[in-house]
Image: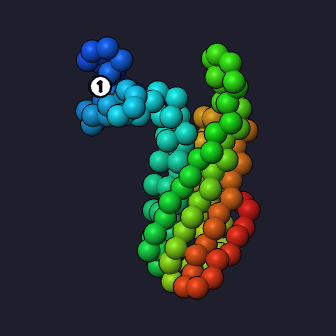
Amino acid sequence: MTTESVSVEWVRDQVFLMRDHQNFPVVMTQPMGVSGADLLPLSLVGCAIWDVMAILLKQKQRVSRCEVLAESERDADPPWQFRRIRIVYHLTGKKLDEKAVKRAIHLVEEKYCSVYATLKGAVELVSEYHIQEIGSEELGKS
């Protein structure tokens, strides 16, 4: 088992300096920083894009752009619990193999992404992907 520590330090007012386990800084405040609640879906798609790209590049897929969007549905009242997160993968490249893309996303969501594995029992997680080729777009669901 691995143990990692992160920290948050109050700076002033509602400004906080967060540091990851490698001491990388992230400012949490509004409107000029990230909100605490946004960190959950950001962590999810950050983990996902990291692993999807690692798999696709290892498979020599010619990806020129990859963006992952998370749309969150939360309760209207405190504590504003997350109920559903829709993950949308947008990939652009030359002759991307749709089966390879679908498999990479499946592996990430079922095996490699620790954030996905942690959340899937607590929040409804759904995903889809879009592949953009030169002059055409294909849509698939994973």
Residue displayed at 45% across by 30% down = 35
Q: Is residue 106 above or below residue 95?
A: above
Q: Does residue 50 appear to the left or right of 23 in the view shown?
A: right
Which image quadrant for residue 16?
top left
Q: Circle 1 — which element?
A: strand
Residue nearest the observer in this picture, 88 or 78:
78
Q: Is residue 70 above or below residue 21?
A: below
**Split into 4 quadrants, where in the image is the C terminus?**
bottom right
**Residue at far front of view:** 31
On the image, the x and y values in percent for residue 122 come to 69, 30
Q: Does residue 36 appear to the left or right of 132 in the view shown?
A: left
Residue displayed at 67% across by 30% down = 74
Residue displayed at 68% across by 59% down = 128
Q: Is residue 84 visible?
A: yes
Which image quadrant for residue 29?
top left
Q: Is residue 110 visible?
A: no
**Mark 1, residue position:** 17
- Would you call the spot at circle 1 few (<14 residues within 10 Å), some (14-19), or many (20 or more)? some
Residue nearest the observer in this picture, 60 or 62:
62
On the image, the x and y values in percent for residue 134 come to 54, 85
User: Which amino acid does the dot numbered 1 rest on?
Assistant: Leu
Residue nearest the observer in this picture, 118 or 129:
129
Q: Is residue 28 above or below residue 105?
A: above
On the image, the x and y values in percent for residue 120 come to 68, 38
